[in-house]
Image (cartoon, rainbow, N blue to C red):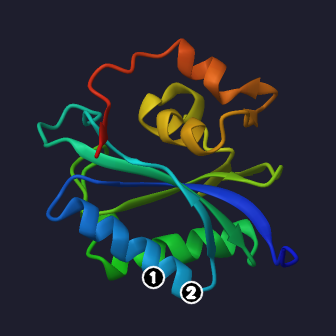
Amino acid sequence: MRPSRGTTAYLCLGSNVGGRAATMGLALGTLARAGLTIRARSSLYETPPWGPIPQGPYLNQVVEVESPVPPRSLLFLALLVERMLGRDRPHEVRFGPRRIDIDILLFGSEKVDAQDLEIPHPRLMERAFALVPLTEIAPEIEVGGVRAKDALAGLDRSGILKVT
């Protein structure tokens, strides 16, 4: 076993525009080439969209990565990959369709509370579309002293389908 080079982080990827699975694969490949080690990845899940804008379903996936960089640098990398793959954050509608979305769910045991970055992700424990794939690869993970699978037990999972 090789020694750890960084911090374990969990990222949630989502896409509901274009070739969703292919875009998410490109995002993961780009993140790996940029220095993240992909340790585990969940299945792909098709999930209903959030928000008031009519749009197609998302594909979501959670990956466990080893990050050699601190949280803010990881955020910068995620935003860069999103831009490279066609996301235009400044001009998109909140909760609207998107080609790619990369959220940092957890970064080791660190807590970050800044205007542009909150870790753990502030709405993680309310979102079945993130908790279903997270608990697939990290079934005993806790967030703020609460097991993610316990939080998931109280959420509506209707419409979330594992893609085979």
Along the viewing direction, whichever of 134 and 2 lies nearer the viewer: 2
Q: Is residue 26 above or below residue 50?
A: below
Real-space CA distance between mark 2 and mark 1, rounded to the nearest whole angstrom = 6 Å
Along the viewing direction, whichever of 150 and 118 lies nearer the viewer: 150
Counting from the top left corner in percent of width and height, residue 89 is at 34, 64
Counting from the top left corner in percent of width and height, residue 107 is at 73, 56
Residue at far right of view: 3
Cβ atoms under marks 2 and 1 closer than 8 Å: yes
Dot 1 corresponds to which residue? 30
Q: Is residue 10 above or below residue 149?
A: below
Q: Is residue 32 above or below residue 138?
A: below
- Point 41% across, 35% down: residue: 129
Q: Is residue 115 visible?
A: no
**Position of the N terminus by quadrant:** bottom right
Dot 2 corresponds to which residue? 34
- Looking at the picture, which amino acid does disc 1 mark? Thr
Q: Is residue 7 above or below residue 147?
A: below
Counting from the top left corner in percent of width and height, residue 130 is at 48, 39
- Point 74% across, 77% down: residue: 69
Q: Residues within 10 Å of mark 1 (few under 14, many from 20)?
A: some
The kind of secondary structure element at disc 2 is loop
The kind of secondary structure element at disc 1 is helix
* Left or right of 129, for residue 11: right
Answer with the quarter of the image where residue 81 lies: bottom left
Q: Residues within 10 Å of mark 2 (few under 14, many from 20)?
A: few
- The label number, if any, that marks residue 122 in the structure image: none
Residue at far top of view: 154
- Looking at the picture, which amino acid does disc 2 mark? Ala
- Point 23% across, 47% down: residue: 96
Counting from the top left corner in percent of width and height, residue 62 is at 50, 51
* Left or right of 93, for residue 67: right
* Left or right of 6, for residue 88: left
